[in-house]
Image: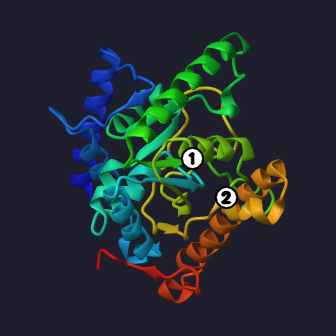
Amino acid sequence: ADEIVLSNMTVALDRIFKDVKDPFVFLPYHKAMREPFDYYMFGQNYIRPLIDFRSSYVGNISLFCEMEERLRQGHNVVLISNHQTEADPAIIALLLEATNPHIAENMTYVAGDRVITDPLCKPFSMGRNLVCVYSKRHMNDDPELAEMKKKENTRSLKEMARLLRGGSQIIWIAPSGGRDRPDCVTKEWFPEPFDASSVDNMRRLSEYAGVPGHIYPLAILCHDIMPPPSQVEKDIGERRVISFHGTGLSVAPEISFVEIVAACGDPEEAKVAYTQALYDSVMQQYSVLNSAIHGKQGLEASIPTVSLSQPWN
């Protein structure tokens, strides 16, 4: 453990120092940097020792295989997910690398501005495919910058539309606008509610891309590894506390907007109902992962709609 910590922290501090001396500037769409230095593998190798794979689980692994097939056919896949830690992209990739390396390495994450400006985050962000946006939570932190942030978000939406028109894209987005936080009374962790306009924007971008698109609800449980501060902070430079723990990832079958509209009739009602259907699925999957990991039920926590496995075994 001492050797791993020394090795990983040496590389991390070396990369952070390099960026402080010569800051890297992210474009609205950032392609993972794999050479001459492989920032993707740097992130994987840093987070890997924090995951207790003995008590980690993936729900419905067959659906990830279904996604890979759709990507091969030129379709787009959108994952509507909760968000728990700065390490989410690495944890998703690590839990899928044994069975679905294409998804692990090619996913594009819709990322808030903090992970592309915080000196500690930047080297990890440089190893991921990102569409960079300003989160609603921080849009008005500095009122003088609000207009600039809105313009940058418009540029990012155009980049997203361009990517989707090309097909074979897998996009991860957390429409809550930030990381989950524990309930201040019970201290229980649950996915934050989804913003209906964010979900609808993503749905319309997918729909108007001119290639088939599929929207799946995804749940991730990994807050123990690198929990966020208990409150949303304005300032860059939060304290990081990391630990070794089990993690979980689960996906459920895609949810069709057309079917929701047919049931609702009213398009505005349908937007809210569609967002709620995605959120309810994420909540159900999260509950299963929570029973498996924190409830120590393991694979026995599976239910008919969420089949848990450990595909790295």
Residue 118 vertical position relative to residue 50 in the rendered view, above or below: above
Image quarter (top left, top right, bottom left or bottom right) of the N terminus: bottom left
Seen as rendered, the residue at the extreme bottom is 300
Residue 99 sits in which quadrant?
bottom left
In this view of the protein, can residue 183 be seen by the observer? yes
Q: Residue at x 38, y 19 (%)?
A: 25
Of 49 and 271, the residue lying toward us: 271
C-beta proximity under 8 Å, tags 1 and 2? yes
Is residue 74 rendered to the left or right of residue 274? left
Q: Position of residue 110 (x, y in %)?
A: 51, 40
Secondary structure of residue under mark 1: helix
The residue tagged 2 is 257
Residue 177 sits in which quadrant?
top right
Q: Residue at x 78, y 55 (%)?
A: 270
Q: Position of residue 67 (x, y in %)?
A: 41, 63
Q: Position of residue 212 (x, y in %)?
A: 47, 53
Q: Residue at x 52, y 55 (%)?
A: 79
Is residue 307 rendered to the left or right of residue 137? left
Q: Residue at x 34, y 65 (%)?
A: 69
Residue 52 sits in which quadrant?
bottom left
Seen as rendered, the residue at the extreme top is 144
- Dot 1 or dot 2, earlier in sequence: 1
Label at residue 207: 1
Secondary structure of residue under mark 2: helix
